[in-house]
Image: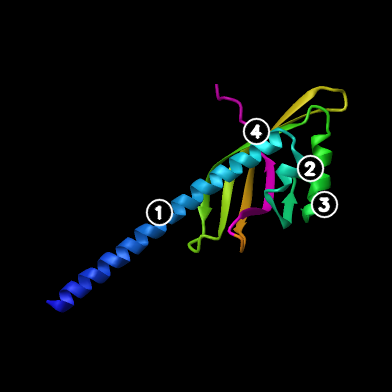
């Protein structure tokens, strides 16, 4: 009987630990969605320093068709120049995060919209999709370490 109770207790503890881990990963996902939403708002407001605060010091940003921008100072220059483009605006929405079992690395999938004026002053809108990779630092704070995006595929014309 003692073995049966001990075995049942072990199974219950393992199940509780597994469900606790799942709940913790859900909490991490919710936290990252909240952080990413705050980041999107900072970028929409063109707040350079607040926008920068979401990237790690060693982050890499990989814009479409351009070389990677590596490190906080290079990203600061990139963001400052982008925010200064006439008609520039950006917004994105991350739909979900996948979190590592250890709970310290995650990636998010997003869609984005960027607008800016072309050389003739006409407002251009581009739709894209992106992936961000996040790392939890020793201080417990989440920072984006890789930020890459590209153009979303054009919607094909409807069939006749």
Whichever of labels 1 and 3 marks the residue nearer the N terminus, that label is: 1
Relative placement, left or right, of 17 versus 97 is left
Q: Residues within 10 Å of mark 3 (few under 14, many from 20)?
A: some
Q: Can residue 122 be seen from the camera position used here? A: yes
Q: CA distance from mark 1 to mark 2?
A: 36 Å
Which residue in the protein does label 1 denote?
23
Q: Nearer the viewer, residue 90 or 125?
A: 90
First in sequence: mark 1 vs mark 2: 1
Mark seen at residue 74: 3
Residues in magenta?
Answer: 140-160
Residue 114 image-quadrant placement:
top right
Q: Residue furthest front?
A: 139
Alpha carbons under labels 4 and 1: distance apart: 38 Å
Q: In terms of sequence position, does the residue under pointer 3 or pointer 2 come before the other? A: 3
Discs 1, 2 touching: Cβ within 8 Å: no
Camera-side mark, 4 or 2: 2
Of the image marks 4 and 1, the number of the one nearer the N terminus? 1
For label 1, the SS is: helix
Seen in the picture, residue 62 relative to 85 is either above or below; the reply is below
| x 65%, y 42%: residue | 39
Based on the displayed image, in which of its 4 quarters is residue 56 positioned?
Answer: bottom right
Residue holding disc 4: 154
* Distance Cα–Cα, label 3 vs label 2: 9 Å
Of circles 4 and 1, the one toward us is 1
Disc 4 versus disc 2: distance between alpha carbons?
26 Å
Of residues 55 and 112, the one drawn nearer to the viewer in this rendering: 55
Report the Cα–Cα distance between label 1 and label 3. 38 Å
Looking at the rendered image, the quarter that the N terminus falls into is bottom left
Magenta region includes residue 159: yes
């Amino acid at each position: 009987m003692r073995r049966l109770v001990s075995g049942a207790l072990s199974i219950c503890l393992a199940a509780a630990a597994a469900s606790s881990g799942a709940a913790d990963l859900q909490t991490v996902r919710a936290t990252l969605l909240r952080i990413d939403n705050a980041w999107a708002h900072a970028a929409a407001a063109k707040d350079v320093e607040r926008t920068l605060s979401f990237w790690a010091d060693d982050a890499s940003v990989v814009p479409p068709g351009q070389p990677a921008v590596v490190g906080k100072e290079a990203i600061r220059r990139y963001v400052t120049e982008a925010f200064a483009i006439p008609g520039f605006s950006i917004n994105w929405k991350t739909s979900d995060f996948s979190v590592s079992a250890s709970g310290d690395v995650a990636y998010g999938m997003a869609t984005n919209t960027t607008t800016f004026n072309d050389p003739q002053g006409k407002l251009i809108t581009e739709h894209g999709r992106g992936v961000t990779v996040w790392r939890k630092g020793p201080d417990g704070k989440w920072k984006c370490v890789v930020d890459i995006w590209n153009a979303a595929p054009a919607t094909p014309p409807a069939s006749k």
